């Protein structure tokens, strides 16, 4: 599984610590330097069954400075996917893509259930 994280993110640090404690194998990807492209995000979106809005890092500075809370509702899915692919800092993190699942953010109970840990 791939785990997209930002090294300064405290939630990412907690998630990685949890994965390490549970001895879960993962490939770590820097979401800022090597952010997911449109194809990856679109595939994860379709697999997740979640609303596309959930993929946005709504607490991030970039999201707020772009006033996306006002703009997203008027954007098509394709426009939103382009936006998410344009900058990793717009993507909710940690962003995890497994063989048949997607995790957004770190909720220990959800991760434990999904990863059977």
Image: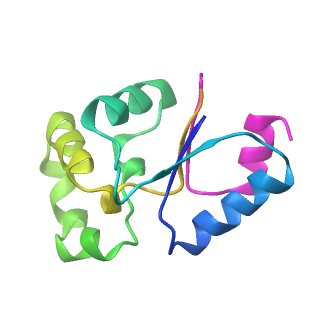
Coloring applied to the structure: rainbow
The count of marks equals 0
Quadrant location of the N terminus?
top right
Q: Quarter holding the C terminus? A: top right
Who's the residue at 47% across and 64% down the image? 6
* Residue at image location 48% in from the left, 25% down from the top: 47
Residue for point 68% across, 58% down: 16
- Closer to the camera in the image, 28 or 46: 28
Q: Is residue 80 left or right of residue 44?
A: left
Q: Toward which corner of the image does residue 39 lie, by quadrant?
A: top left
| 84 magenta-colored | no
| 62 relative to 53, above or below | below
Which residues fall within the magenta stretch?
A: 99-117
Residue 106 lies in the magenta stretch: yes
95 lies left or right of 113: left
Residue 10, image x and y in percent?
59, 74
Quarter of the figure with residue 37: top left
Out of 72 and 12, give the one closest to the viewer.
Answer: 12
Task: Say left or right for 28 vs 32.
Answer: right
Q: Position of residue 63 (x, y in %)?
A: 27, 68
Q: Is residue 106 above or below residue 116?
A: below
Residue 43 position by quadrant: top left
- Which residue is at 65% across, 41% downward? 26
Q: Height in image: 76 above or below 109?
A: above
Q: Position of residue 15 (x, y in %)?
A: 68, 59
Horizontally, residue 101 falls left or right of residue 114, namely left
């Amino acid at each position: 599984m791939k785990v997209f994280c930002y090294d300064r993110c405290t939630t990412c640090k907690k998630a990685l610590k949890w994965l390490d404690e549970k001895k879960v194998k993962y490939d770590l990807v820097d979401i800022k330097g090597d952010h997911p492209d449109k194809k990856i995000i679109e595939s994860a979106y379709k697999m997740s069954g979640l609303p596309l809005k959930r993929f946005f890092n709504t607490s991030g500075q970039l999201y707020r400075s772009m006033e996306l809370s006002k703009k997203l509702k008027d954007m098509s899915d394709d426009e939103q996917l382009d936006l998410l692919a344009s900058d990793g800092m717009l993507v909710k993190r940690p962003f995890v893509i497994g063989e048949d699942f997607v995790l957004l953010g770190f909720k220990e109970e959800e991760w434990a259930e999904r990863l059977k840990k």
